[in-house]
Amino acid sequence: MSDKATIEVNGQKYDFPLVKGTENEVAIDIKSLRGATNGVVTIDPGYKNTGSCTSAITFLDGEKGILRYRGYSIEELAEKADFLEVAYLLIFGELPTQEQLDKFHADIKSHSVVDDDVRKIVDAFPKSAHPMGVLASLTSALTAFNPSSVNVNSEEEMYKAIVRIMGKFPVLVAWTLRKKHGLPLDYGDKNLGYVENCLKMMFKQPNEEYVLDPVVVDALDKLLILHADHEQNCSTSTVRIVGSSHAGLFASLSSGISALWGPLHGGANQAVLEMLEAIKEDGGDTKKYMAKAKDKDDPFRLMGFGHRVYKNFDPRARIIKKSADDVLGNLGIEDPILDIAKGLEKEALEDDYFVKRKLYPNVDFYSGIIYRAMGIPTDMFTVMFALGRLPGWIAQWREMRLNNEPIGRPRQIYIGETLRPFKAINKR
């Protein structure tokens, strides 16, 4: 293969170098296009064919159903590592030794207390506030309590900023849930593991001891791992582009939370449960809704099936399906919504229409089922997604800053009015 690409514009040919990744992905490097061609740019709405950066963090092949963090398969990480190990791997590039992991966890715990003035901000929100709006606001507010900017060239300062947000973010997640339920705010238990402490902070009742369920702990641990990073998606790209202006880590993370909020991104698992609720309200006939999903003239869309990136199967869904089965079996929950979900899953896996089109249940389908079984409200699902995605956002922000990437500044093609004279108001 040639090491260059030739683009012809108005009869003039221009050569541009090809960039090849370690997994043999190929890109045309067009950063000199505008200057070489006297103003010509590319246009790619949604950036579906545009690489914004080179990255050593996550490899994703949607056609083959491959997802790897720093070279490790998602299947092996979900089976053999815990969330904090994966977080360390994503952020720092290698799996931690036991000593490194213990220190990482201890340092996170030492920064897990949120300034008590943040409680006043939580109190100011009505219970009806959407949890994602609350979480984005609280994350941004952390900047006020940690005003100094991070010197990205100092490993010590960067590390402190990372363990600080890793420690405080679960508290913000838990407070967001407890505010919604009218429960007293809790700082957690330093004797527990990271995931165990998250669960206790969220669900402990003030008048009884909280007992951890190992099946629930394992399921949440896996969900957080599966959501930890996913290449240059909408929220990750947002974190990087905000950070490219040299905005601080907390502000950049807050922007990522806001991007994740949308139903086309992190809100997808919430949309799954809302769809299941609608099916239940209409009588719970799954066959009727499968027929509607296959009808091109019907506006109904089956949420949680297929994926805009994975054209074969979502590797994360295969992993989390077992956890969903384990949680439902262990908790013994009788819930018509979950029965409808299991009915849709069974029919989709056996229906030729869905099988031929590879419209399999994706990770959002199963994660929504698990969160509902755990007792997490539907509008908190995306908050849980953010908890998992936190180390990926940190890793991407850190990589972008250490690579000294230029400020993000997309171009456009103007299609508005050309120059025209101003009209006095009495002549308009």
Image (cartoon, grey):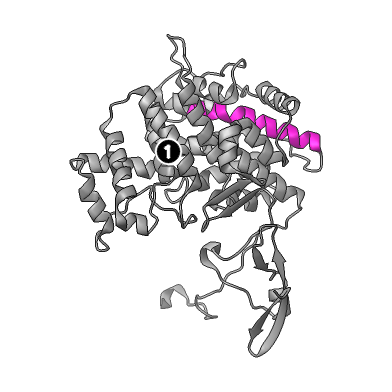
- Residue 324 horizontal side relative to residue 220, left or right: left
187 shown above or below 155:
above
Image-quadrant location for residue 108: top right
Residue 387, by quadrant, is top right
Mark 1 Cα within 10 Å, few/some/many (few <14, many 20+)? many
Residue 218: image location, x then y, percent: 51, 27
Say which residue label 1 marks: 321
Residue extending farthest bottom: 11
Q: Is 337 situated above or below 114?
A: below
Instruction: Using the rendered image of the protein, determine whether residue 130 is visible from the camera's viewpoint.
Output: no
User: Label 1 is placed on what type of residue?
Assistant: Lys
- Residue 43: percent from the left, percent from the top? 56, 71
| Stretch of the chain drawn in magenta | 155-176
* Placement of 244 over or under 118, stated as above or below: below
The secondary element bearing badge 1 is classed as helix
Residue 229 location (% of width, % of height): 58, 44
Q: Position of residue 307 (x, y in %)?
A: 44, 53
- Count of labels shown? 1
